[in-house]
Image: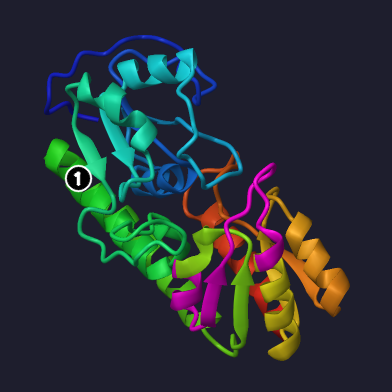
Amino acid sequence: MKRVLALALTLVLLSGCGRQAAPGDRHILCTTYPVYLFTTAVTQGVDGIQVDLLVNQQTSCLHDYTLTVEDMRAVEAADVIVRNGAGLEAFLDDALAQKDVPILDCAQTIPLLPAQDEGEGEMDPHIWMDPDRASQMVAAIAQGLSGLDPEDQSSFAANAQAAQGRLKSLKAGGGQALQGPFITFHDGFQYFAHAFSLSAPRAIEEEEGAEISAKELAELIALVRDANVPAVFVEKNGSRRSADVIARETGCKVYELDMVMSGDGTGIEPYLEALSQDLETVREALG
């Protein structure tokens, strides 16, 4: 890949790469797994680029995330940082304030929904759970990288267009016969619910050691009974204690949905597989 910007390269083993960087590679550091998947899709087949992942764990709640020594090394070695935006990576603010590199913010031009479990004025950062917004993230990455490296603009644009075509197909094929109350024990599925016309999405934020109150639990049990809700949903690897109580009390079932926040794949395919599985799960659950 022809260099346009003279960027200082630090040859270290990055926390998410698993290989030694080649001299002359441009280091692109992606903050989260969805951003990493979209960026590797956009840069596929383009020489001289190494794309690395900062946070690779099955959680979408990053407000308590603490940077490790390896994370700081990865940030220091990055020539470009691609982030989700919308406040998801607040844990990085101090580190980025001391880092003079281009930062591509995927959410900068994307319409946001109000957060379901935060105070007034807070916005929901889980934009990747809507294929249409994911397509906008892909476009933002391609546009940002093209601005840094115009000579590879055609490759970025072609890759982005291919990924967006797959995302469009996912959205078109998934938005059929998904109806019914949508109750999740995580606040990260609001965009998913809106994307696929799930009615009355309600999120109950629950983490291990911070379960919902007895009063709220009783209200949810009454809601599930009165509305004859067939299923409630929890995040993969998340807390399901209250969901299991509701299931025992009402006879509804508990299903797991994937937030696509960890994995070892690259490109658009792991994202498509995860959301397709989520759609199949919802179809089965709501019948």
- The residue sitting at the top extreme is 11
Q: Which residues are magenta?
A: 191-215
Residue 218 lies, with reference to residue 179, above or below; the image says: above
Residue assigned mark 1: 144
x then y, percent, for residue 84:
35, 47
Total count of labels: 1
The reply, left or right, for residue 58 in relation to residue 83 is right
Tell me if residue 40 is in the magenta stretch: no
Q: Nearer the viewer, residue 109 or 148?
A: 109
x then y, percent, for residue 110:
26, 62
**Quarter of the figure with residue 226:** bottom right
Residue 20 lies, with reference to residue 153, above or below; the image says: above
Q: Nearer the viewer, residue 79 or 185?
A: 185
Q: Which quarter of the figure is the C terminus placed in?
A: bottom right
Residue 266 lies, with reference to residue 176, above or below; the image says: above
Q: Nearer the viewer, residue 231 or 119?
A: 119
x then y, percent, for residue 205:
57, 57
Residue at position x 60%, y 90% in the image: 177
Q: Is residue 284 visible?
A: no
Q: Secondary structure at mark 1?
A: helix
